Amino acid sequence: MDRGTEREAPPRRGTDTAGPGDPADAGRVPLAVVVVDRDGLVSHWSSGARRLFGVAKEEAVGQPAVDLLPVSGALPDVDDDLPYDDYAALDGLGPGLGSSLDHGLSYPAAGRARLTVPQYATGDRPDPGDRVDVLWWAYPLVGPGRERLLVLAADAAGLHEQDGGGGADGHGGDGTGGAQDPADPFAVERIAPGFALHTDFPGAEDLAGRLPEILPSMSVGESARIVSQVLELGYPVLEFSQNARVPVTPDWGVSRRVERRARRERAARAAAEGLPIPDDLADEGEDLEYAAVRERLEFLNEVSGRIGTSLDLARTIVEVSKAVVPRFTDVAGTYLREQVVAGEGFAKGVPDTTTLWHRVALEHTDEPGRWDDVVPVGEAMPFPAHTPFFQCMTTGEPVLVPRISEQLGHAIASQFDKRDIRPLITGRSMLVVPLKARNVVLGFMILLRHPERAEFNDMDKVTGAELAARAGLVLDNARMYTYQESVAETLQDSMLPHIPPHRTGCDIATRYLPGTLLGRVGGDWFDSVKLPGARTALVVGDVMGHGLNSAAMMGQLRTAVQTMAALDLPPAQLLRNLDDLAQRLGDGYLATCLYAVYDPIAGVLHLANAGHIPPVLVRAGDGRSELLELPTGAPIGVGGVPFESVGVPVEPGDRLVMCTDGLVEMRGEDIGVGLATLCASAAHPAASMDDACDTIIRALNTRGGRKDDVALLMARLNGIAPEDVAEWRFPPEPAQVGRARVVVREQLHGWGLPRLADPAELMVSELVTNAVRHTRARPVEVRLVRGDTLLCEVDDDDHELPTLRNAGPEAEAGRGLRVVSALAREWGTSRTGAGKTVWFELTLPRR
């Protein structure tokens, strides 16, 4: 990065503090520390960053990090056969850092780079324009703060020279005499046997104290340990945490790898020829061990990136099994506890010989079909105490069997009825590793290698244990997600009503579709409420938002609608009361709602709307569909907005379609397109109500892009024929009670319902008697309706609702409603604008 040549050189450190010979200053290596906030701006810029990148703190803080940190273009593919100069030709911190700065990486990254020395560099630093070897790390930060990314960088030459002799100048490794800069909290001092982070600057204590919060699963001590490994080994090591995937190993460079490969080849030739190993190759075994460790870590890092790509339990199981075949093993069988397979919770504790284990996956490199019939996926079995599998699942530790003997092969095969598994396992090396999460054994993996392949060793055992630990966490996350999804579905199903397909005067069909991307639980609902007078209330609503909170809110509002509908409130008044309730429940209660009342006798729909999309009415006569124009109103919970009710005449056979906006709204598409498609699909002829709903869903749900959940309610408005309704008006006189009994009996005989005449006559007598006793001036009205049931209603102008009472032996009143309650299929009371209605129903006899 070129910042100009006229910048004033930064002050040299160490001129008035400890001298170069002070042993306390030996081994000190400064790190460039940069903290980037969520807006991509620098919020912390250490003095080490000033030295390395050539920008003062005052000029860096608050500026975009991408403008201050030198990021190079794409690196060439590095191969052992490439010359080192091909790597060194690039200048900058590498594209990996650029991806981190641009939110492209959500996990830690690292790399090795070449930087041009800032032009103002002086003294014992390389000349301006020279290039230095730099190691860098980028850690995404989590937590409530503004910080998003922590970037560390160090001069690699300084790291190599920390063998006790100090840095390039023999002092502190930074070319400044080795003194600690009080403005730089991240300079690292070697303190035998470990290292510590220095935070002796104003505000450093707060920043250092927050590291355990913003670095996932990492304390300040763990951060210091990572840096200590950098200084001890000369390269950043791969750190593994419970978050499973932390790739922080920079490419150390081609030249060292080429050199190591040449040395290994020379050592191998000397050993093959029986010659003594030269002194310069004496540490080759150490290099080979390092190479093996690095290969193991790279494998684990690769596996971590391949498992857990989704929260689908079945897919995760397959990913875990395929990740280890064939690189680590030739056969991988995965067994899980029964509750894990079902996505359920389970009691903690050690499994026993009765615990059933389901074989959920099997991957192998053998010829096709060799394993499938003998050990099929899906089989469940317990394992006896003498097997290595039982030992693994009870101790929670891996079990290594270098070679499966004939005896052990026979013991294992005894668990498989009528199947000889011995030819598949005898002579193979076996490693059984537990799949654990939160100290609970979820299952285990059986890993087998071909006899001609190297046996599993102790390093493989450690690798397998680490692999299983990561896989266990991934599987447990998928299990918990499956369990929570099941809970959410159960909650949703419990809150959505089970509406009968037939109401008096109408047929109803419904559909509910969970959101495809936002979870399987939401705030959409539909409902149907039986009202007095053979009427039916139809409701569709949509709570704003998704998840369990929205579902819980939906349940409260739906219950409130049912309660107020049972009071027979007019649609506009019901929405007014619902809006008041939502405001009392809290500021976050916002929902849209469409409420309709169908009167099959009068042939009219009364509707009120609270910010919901309009319904569609399909006319039976010509099949024409139309969006009903209703006063929109404000959503429930806004408050202070009036609601209006509209009456719409309907004919028998008309269909009303009500839905939530998730069905018609698509990202990037005008909602008018969805409404037009809804009208067209609703008008399409169908053999049944269910077929009609499916036609609408197919027309609107196949366009793609739907994220929201969907509630759909369709009602066919059949009406009630005039000949099925009989009405009478009686003066409020006691003598009219006998006349009411007579006309009801005659009507029932005329309808061919003589079996209902006696109970109906008795109950009408009781209700008319009460009405005559309590009415003021208006006539008493009696209505019989023959629909799905026989409905009888008695109206008067008294607003006080009657209740059941305990009548004593000497009481002259209080027994009438007990007679009605004992004889009727259902009965109830409701207030009307003029007074009240008391009604009862009787079941029609089968024809």
Image (spheres, grey):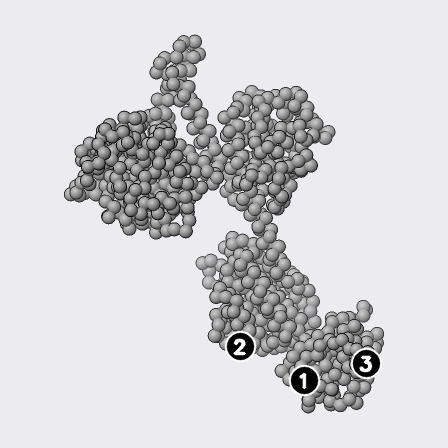
| Circle 2 SS class | loop
**Residue in the image at 47% along x and 58% along y:** 667
Tag of residue 456: none
| Secondary structure found at label 3 | loop
Picture coordinates of residue 155 (x, y %)? 29, 34
Mark 2 crowdedness (10 Å alpha carbons): few <14, some 14-19, many ≥20: some
**Mark 3, residue position:** 810
- Can you say which quadrant of the picture contains the N terminus? top left
Ranked by sequence position, the earlier of labels 1 and 2 is 2
Q: Is residue 155 above or below residue 46?
A: above
**Residue under label 1:** 798
Residue 716: which quarter of the image?
Answer: bottom right
Question: Pointer 2: what residue?
Answer: 644
Residue drawn at point x = 42 percent, y = 15 percent: 268
Q: Amino acid at mark 2?
A: Glu
Q: Secondary structure at mark 1?
A: loop
The kind of residue on which mark 3 rests is Glu
Q: Earlier in the sequence, mark 3 or mark 2?
A: 2
Q: Earlier in the sequence, mark 3 or mark 1?
A: 1
